[in-house]
Image: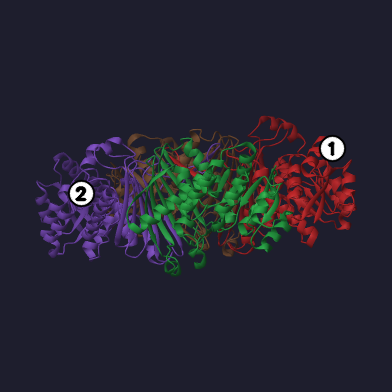
Chain colours: A purple, B brown, C red, D green
Amino acid sequence: MVRFAILGCGRIGRMHARHIRAHPRADLVVCYDVAGAAALETAAETGAVVADSAADAIGHHEVDAVFIASSTDTHVDLLTLAARAGKPVLCEKPIDLDLARVDACWEDIGRLAPLIVLGFNRRFDPSFRSLRERLLAGEIGRLEQAVITSRDPAPPPVSYVQGSGGLFRDMTIHDFDMARYLAGDIVEVQAMGANLVDPAIGAAGDIDAAMILLRAASGALVHINNSRRCAYGYDQRIEAFGKKGMLQAQNRHLTTVEAWTATATGVRDPVQDFFITRYAEAYWAELDHFVDCVENGTRPIAGFAEGRESLRLADAALQSMHEGRAVRI
Amino acid sequence: MVRFAILGCGRIGRMHARHIRAHPRADLVVCYDVAGAAALETAAETGAVVADSAADAIGHHEVDAVFIASSTDTHVDLLTLAARAGKPVLCEKPIDLDLARVDACWEDIGRLAPLIVLGFNRRFDPSFRSLRERLLAGEIGRLEQAVITSRDPAPPPVSYVQGSGGLFRDMTIHDFDMARYLAGDIVEVQAMGANLVDPAIGAAGDIDAAMILLRAASGALVHINNSRRCAYGYDQRIEAFGKKGMLQAQNRHLTTVEAWTATATGVRDPVQDFFITRYAEAYWAELDHFVDCVENGTRPIAGFAEGRESLRLADAALQSMHEGRAVRI
Amino acid sequence: MVRFAILGCGRIGRMHARHIRAHPRADLVVCYDVAGAAALETAAETGAVVADSAADAIGHHEVDAVFIASSTDTHVDLLTLAARAGKPVLCEKPIDLDLARVDACWEDIGRLAPLIVLGFNRRFDPSFRSLRERLLAGEIGRLEQAVITSRDPAPPPVSYVQGSGGLFRDMTIHDFDMARYLAGDIVEVQAMGANLVDPAIGAAGDIDAAMILLRAASGALVHINNSRRCAYGYDQRIEAFGKKGMLQAQNRHLTTVEAWTATATGVRDPVQDFFITRYAEAYWAELDHFVDCVENGTRPIAGFAEGRESLRLADAALQSMHEGRAVRI
Amino acid sequence: MVRFAILGCGRIGRMHARHIRAHPRADLVVCYDVAGAAALETAAETGAVVADSAADAIGHHEVDAVFIASSTDTHVDLLTLAARAGKPVLCEKPIDLDLARVDACWEDIGRLAPLIVLGFNRRFDPSFRSLRERLLAGEIGRLEQAVITSRDPAPPPVSYVQGSGGLFRDMTIHDFDMARYLAGDIVEVQAMGANLVDPAIGAAGDIDAAMILLRAASGALVHINNSRRCAYGYDQRIEAFGKKGMLQAQNRHLTTVEAWTATATGVRDPVQDFFITRYAEAYWAELDHFVDCVENGTRPIAGFAEGRESLRLADAALQSMHEGRAVRI
């Protein structure tokens, strides 16, 4: 049984709190949020107690592990506190928006060899995971090309965009990690961005559509395409191509119903359009994996290094876009 | 909060017990099974107490509602006990294999107007439910034809078959209910059976493959096809056809992965092959519906009458098959 | 090179005339139609000459083979003329609407061992043919169940219905043949008909929707469903089920385009809705097969016997529907 | 009626010759090939006469139009001859491998305003054409992203590669044209190439896998991916994405058959793996369009300018790949 403190009781934190409570090998002991009301709500729903501070929550004597679901700017400090307390951490991505700060954090805590699982939820999606296992098992031969399609249902408000670190660090970071999950280390990045969705995002200095090329150390080529808005839902697909064929993970629909009418045939309902619903199974599997890591010493599927490398690719993509040239890693 | 007694702690009973425990508006108070060990296991897993008898479980002063998941031959007695105790019941299908006994049961308890939800789980499947709602909303006009495909992954042992009441009462009963769910009351039945899967089933006097035609009072025609064995999994599909088009509910796959190779393209993984996995969401929704019925007086989606009518159609199909003629209801 | 006379220059006759002209091993010599204008048009388009009578066309000294595409009531007489003239015949289905007349025809010409290919075009459809070849090759084991879906885009005028011999002889006859193509000889028929599409068809004494069950001598069960009207096009599907799995031949779309929007995903265009377009490749393959039969002595894929057996099944289905009982063949 | 000379009677030339013969408004008068035997074969099959030289064929007094299907290095000279003779030309792509030579050609013949249709066959594919028409009709709003997948079944021999002008000029040129067909003028190119398929191709100085990014003047982003080898056939897909949704043109299969077995479900047969079969309808439509241009003054769907622009994009992609930077057009 792993007893958790959860830091951050917003939308995603509350979901994780419910999962912890429902998990047969996990228990929620204490929760904390800078907004006290959010912590109280979570406590009321789960039976956890409310801590006075994040430090108190981490240090609580019954707490075995820490779940960091607070805002990005707090991650480094909380990771450091937890590492120093010798408590394993499951931390939402990203570690931070600033690579230097990420490296300084590791400088500080690396020697403690902390157990950190980073919340790259897509690695735990049953379909993406199955695709990768079949790829590694050689079903299509060595990977030659991958195409990662990742389009959000609707753009965030400009206020969010302004503090997000930009599309590459905020949204594409998942896709950079997915590229590494499939193709391994990346050695070259080319990026093209555009402001096609919301002029206000452009006015705020960011892009809302992008196409990226990556070259892996293995020789494989990877394409990522992003949009901040997608009419038909949350478009999340992967295509892997090799000598012996292709594997595709397609979008998920709510039902299996098809309609055939005078104007259209084979009509499915829209794809799931909310990340929490789309990746519900993945979030559960991520928690389950973390419990395994804590209880059985399982090696993390995504750790601190994965968080750092994705951020480095985001920075390289930004540089490539601004300088109009390929950036080597 | 609805506090349950569960009667029957076999495979399906244990699943229901877990659902009750996980449900935010339900609680499991007491469990009972003729096999004491099964009841002890369920109690250990859920925190329920073990009753000395089904009657004790039903009568337990903290119990608001009864979940009957015991063997078919006990259903009538337990339904009667619960009805007399004035406690709502969620009862696994079928009510009984003998229509006369079913009618006698209702004769006995009908005047008590008991709240009974019958476990026709397919009515709660998100895809079948969505298909029906769209049908009722007029998307394809009035229903003219329905095709119900229902093939089990593997035949049961002959010992099970012998006490099952035969294919129509044991397996097709779900499809008869689905036919009524889509097309309403049925007025004519034609059935053709065969022993194609396992000669031992034929030797035991039963069939293991069937095709059935139904005519609804509305005029709609319905076809059901059954097999006790299906190589590619648990084949559960529905097609509804009307003036304005067609709605189909297709099979469910574990992942969305497709493979494309030199010999085959668009290859999906096998469909789910275990009824508990295939209908996991449906079982959960069924429990949720029952809690709604108990707490809010919601009208049951499937009650005693639905159980009786499906059994009547099974009997009519058997008669049609034996006499080689259409049987009118 | 096979030189043809074509009898009947209506819509289907003109299509066949064009195919004959385009076929590298066929040539069109002469054409005839009771409506002289139709024959003149076909002659103008193809370079054939117009005969004064069907007998003259058949007897033309340059004619090697006869294509009968005239109205059903002329088929027996023209088949007889051609057989007596010792000329191979490709004849549109059905042979006749009256089984006694069909048998009398064979009584007359059978001893001449005429080469007759009957125009059961669906046997030549690339997808249905591939499905059957894979079935015969054992891919799914012995056939246990087949489901044949056959829905016309729009009902014919009542005037046509009145002379058509009824749904079973006019429309289902193709499906009876397809049942035999897949499952072999049929030994039992049960049929249920309804008037759901056009009340005028019911008033004329016919049905416009039907569901049929067949049992093959092999033990296989077959279901046919028919409708005279189908909103999404010409619905032509086959499902074959056996111990090792299932083969399905799906509908054909004009393009491979899919649309994904806010309200619907995976949307294909309507299926082909005109039998001449839907079965264009089949009609071509049928002609090609006939030329093979004439030139190389290839055994016909569908001959006189196939025409007779389908009609017999149509009669049996009619009897079953009227008497409300299974009819054994 | 348009009377053709055909220049080049190789594999693709013979196909075009057959189409010309079968087309109701076209006729084949004369053919020529540097390999006399090929010309004789085509003449024997089609009834055309064999010319002594390309010039004689073009100048033949009965010839209205010229079909250039000879090797790429002859295109400029033959285009020039035909233009000077005032005869419309349908010319296989590419115009030439050398942009300077292409421009010099136009310098020479542009003032003659010749009618030239360039054989970008994919523009005539029914599915790609339908996708584009629906895009232009506004079904998904303004184009924001396009993904063009184009993978050949098997790599050509190295001897061919050496004279091909490289992957971008030989193979991607079709995809550059498709990008322009969908997105209009292109203003920026980024390319990444690799040698993943056949080391001998790399040794010959070429690549056999590529990923490319394009930015259109409209703002749209386009991704092209290429491979010289594809296990599952000739992979030819298009995805267009805009504010209101997505249109996809999927691969084509030979039949509609699906197989469902214990190990795999929904299995389709391999996609068409030969360009002449895959694009048979497109080649026919291309000829039909050219006849329309000649007879009715229809504006060419693809002319000299389209050939030149695609070559320019190929050159830019080569430069981008070699210099590791974005190239602006």
State which chain disc 1 sits on.
C
Residue A279 location, x and y as percent? Answer: 33, 49
Q: Is residue D68 above or below residue C164?
A: below
Q: Amino acid at mark 1?
A: Val
Determine which residue is flagged by label 1.
Answer: C34
Residue closest to the eye, C31 or D215: D215
Residue B9 marker: none
Residue D109 falls in image quadrant? top right
Residue closest to the eye, C316 or C140: C140
- The answer to whether the residues at label 1 and label 2 have Cβ atoms under 8 Å apart is no
Q: Is residue D26 above or below residue C160?
A: below
Residue A76 location, x and y as percent? Answer: 15, 53
Quarter of the image with the N terminus of chain B in it: top left
Q: Nearer the viewer, mark 1 or mark 2?
A: 1
Task: Please give the name of the residue rendered at 77% of the width and 36% of the height, measured from the top-left corner.
Answer: C163
Q: Is residue C124 visible?
A: yes
State which chain disc 2 sits on.
A
Q: Is residue B318 left or right of residue A14?
A: right
Q: Is residue B59 left or right of residue A46?
A: right
Residue B166 location, x and y as percent? Answer: 55, 54
- How far apart, in angstroms, are the residues tagged by discs 1 and 2? 84 Å
Quarter of the image with the C terminus of chain B in it: top right
Secondary-structure class at tag 2: loop
Task: Assess disc 2: are there few (<14), some (14-19) or many (≥20) residues with their C-alpha within 10 Å of its C-alpha.
Answer: many
Task: Assess disc 1: are there few (<14), some (14-19) or many (≥20) residues with their C-alpha within 10 Å of its C-alpha.
Answer: some
Residue A69 marker: 2
Residue D39 location, x and y as percent? Answer: 68, 59
Residue closest to the eye, C24 or C329: C24
